[in-house]
Image: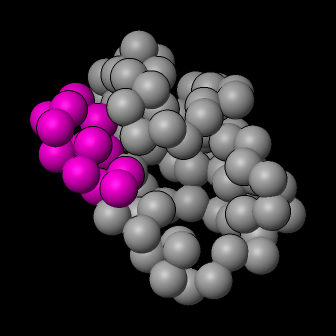
Amino acid sequence: MRKYIIERAIPEVGSFERQQLREAAAKSNDVLRQLGAGIQWVESYVAGDKTFCVYLAENEDIIRKHAEISGFPATTISEIRKMIDPTTATG
């Protein structure tokens, strides 16, 4: 599977209460179960009016299908080609 970062434009998501985030995660998990082994949610970062979600997926189409069924927009889908961190400078 490939690794993707998905930008989701969701107004005021950064001010959601814990329960709202819990419900969103549960909804996403339900859809992931429906879609099967071709997609996996790794983690998400919540900011102002956006979330940035890291997924493992067979392709972009299954990510779009997840967005369609869950109702969480996939505003931008980008395949992660490489990763760097501070230790990259010393390698």
Magenta residue check for 35: yes
Asked if 8 appears above or below 86 in the picture, the reply is above
**35 left or right of 13 in image:** left
Picture residue at 72% right of the left edge, 63% below the top = 13
Using the rendered image of the protein, determine whether residue 2 is visible from the camera's viewpoint: no
Picture residue at 41% right of the left edge, 56% below the top = 42
Please name the predominant secondary structure of the magenta segment in the image: helix
Picture residue at 54% right of the left edge, 74% below the top = 20
Quick one: quadrant of the C terminus? bottom right
Range drawn in magenta: 27-40
**18 left or right of 47 in image:** left
Of residues 85 and 12, which is closer to you in this image? Answer: 12
Asked if 90 appears above or below 69 in the picture, the reply is below
Percent x, y for residue 34?
A: 16, 38
Using the rendered image of the protein, determine whether residue 30 is visible from the camera's viewpoint: yes
**85 left or right of 69 in image:** right
Percent x, y for residue 68?
A: 45, 26
